[in-house]
Amino acid sequence: MVYIYSKKDTSFQKVPEEVNAGWEVWQKNNCQTCHQLYGLGGYMGPDLTNMSSDPHKGPKYMRVFIKYGTNKMPDFHLNDTEVNQVLAFLKWVDQSGQNRVKAESVHWTGTYIIQ
Ligand code: HEC
């Protein structure tokens, strides 16, 4: 079981079972080699950090790519349970942070301004 430290509640919280399983699907299939989370990872495919809440994309759109692949992304032959798990993981990632640093958080010298 994975726990994550919550800065907001200053406590450790259990990561939901489905999210944890989705993280394992993500790891096993090396999604990170082509996709970034929080801006880190491979650059063949797009950053997926905030795609779940993107009004033009979201889970329904993402499901098609994950389930069938495209001519650029492999089909991993995941079953429906695994697809749901990886979508739950990506939704959880979305709620945990941003893929971009906000413009107002960047100092003119290029350093990060802690608000
Ligand atoms: C070999 C590189 C590669 C791997 C590995 C890979 N992807 Fe992709 N993925 C891509 C590319 C390239 C695209 C863009 C597809 C296109 O436009 O045809 C994409 C698109 C997507 C999209 C839709 C995003 C968008 O708007 O285009 C999702 C969601 C996604 N991948 C999830 C995953 C997940 C989950 C895994 C692991 C199970 C994974 N990918 C593994 C290369 C990869």
Image (tube, helix red, strand yellow):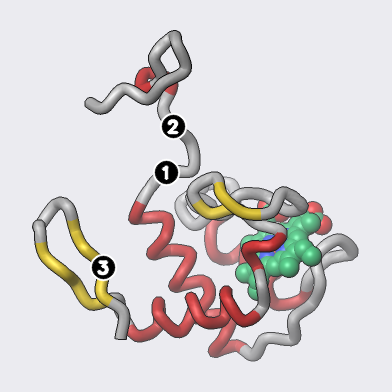
Badge 1 crowding class, 10 Å Cα cut-off, few under 14, some 14 to 19, many 20 or more, is some
First in sequence, mark 2 or 3: give its number.
3
Residue 90 location in percent, x, y?
Answer: 48, 64
In the image, what residue type sits under mark 1?
Answer: Gln
Residue 87 in the image: state x and y as whole percent.
51, 71
Give the number of the mark in front: 3 or 1.
3
* Residue 69: x %, y % from top left: 78, 71
Provide the secondary structure element on which disc 2 rests.
loop
The residue identified by callout 2 is 101
Circle 3 is placed at which residue position? 4
Dots 1 and 2: beta carbons under 8 Å? yes
Q: Amino acid at mark 3?
A: Ile
Q: Residue at x 60, y 49 (%)?
A: 47
Q: Is residue 13 left or right of residue 68?
A: left
Residue 38 rendering spot, x and y as whole percentages: 49, 48
Left or right, residue 24 beside residue 8: right
Of all residues, the one furthest to the right in this rendering is 71
Please state the quadrant of the image where ligand 1 appears. Answer: bottom right
Crowding at mark 3 (Cα within 10 Å: few <14, some 14-19, many 20+): few
